[in-house]
Image (cartoon, grey):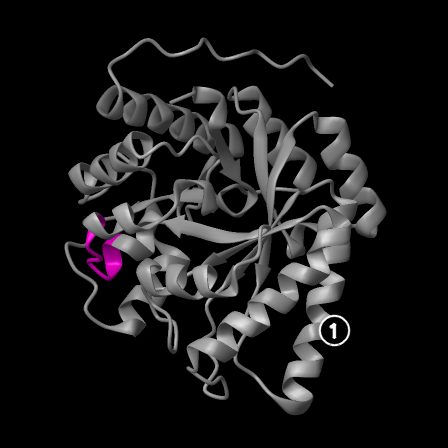
Amino acid sequence: MNQDHFGMDTITLAGPLEARLRAARDAGFGQIMLSARDVVGHPDGETGAISAVRESGLRVTGFQILRDFEGLSGQLHAYKLDIAKSMLGMCRALGSKLLLVCSSTSAHASGDPELLARDLGKLATLAVPLGIRVAYEALSWGKHVSEFISAWDIVASADRANLGLALDSFHVLATKSDLTDLEIVDPEKIFLVQLADFMWRELPSAEERMDTADHFRVFPGEGAHSAQVADFVRRLDAMGYRGDYSFEVFNDDYVQLPAPLVAARARQSVKWITDHVSRRSLPMRRVMPAP
């Protein structure tokens, strides 16, 4: 496990985009997860956001998030396809090689696995000429796909080289998914792992999962499921996953604190993970030069 593979997400930090990028870089991170809001909400528009990212020197972990895409028909499908093309364009402009897609929560979406695989395959095909990979994530309150093993079945069925999984420890823990099912997944098809914990022992309802996911996640090592998070990462490391880990931590308290302070908590979480998952020597992190 390489410490350089850990990154932050802009959604965890307060302030303008430039300040959030600087806080992540100054804390020793070399990569950042971006959202569409970072682009459209920038005072200087898309051009300003792209310039800020490039000047930061940070690698873009991925771009999020395309919602409620798969399983639709007719005008709804055409509408979402158009949205997807725009998202792919922004993804490429930011220099991101990965677009995140979460499982649909739409009441209008079909649960037919063949249709879901076909739609994701179509999205992956659109991404090919742009050099972008598509990572499909199971939301713990998804309408038809709420666990990673179901998402894997669809990804495997679609059978596209640039279509894989995004695994989020929050959703895995919230649904009490069986971690032994990870053995079924091809590690080469795991395109991203997102890490977070939470304070409550259980989240039995979809409403509780949604509320906690959007407002009160915490960094690994801070929550009530430390042992399970460590086990999750340990299993991924043992099965050969060598990709990126991104802290996707939505927290209403963190966005009321100075960004450097929160970024320092994230760096402490990296140490906690590496201390608990791997006792072998790790490469020293590289200190990035000031932009």
Residue that appears at 31% across and 35% down: 239
Left or right of 130, for residue 156? left
Depth order, front residue of 279/122: 122
Residue 15: x and y in percent read 61, 42
> What residue sits 73% from the left and 40% below the top?
95
On screen, residue 77 versus residue 255, left or right, reads right
**What amino acid is at disc 1?**
Asp
Task: Name the image quarter holding residue 238.
Answer: top left
The answer to whether 146 appears left or right of 203 in the picture is: right
Give the residues drawn in magenta, as a range.
173-179
Residue 178 on the magenta span: yes
Q: Which residue is mark 1?
A: 82
Is label 1 in a helix, a strand or a loop?
helix
Spot occupied by residue 94 in the image (x, y as percentages of width and height) = 74, 43
Q: How far across and how far down the image is residue 33, in percent?
A: 57, 42
User: Image point 41% across, 46% down: which residue?
Assistant: 249
Where's the N terminus, which quadrant?
A: top left
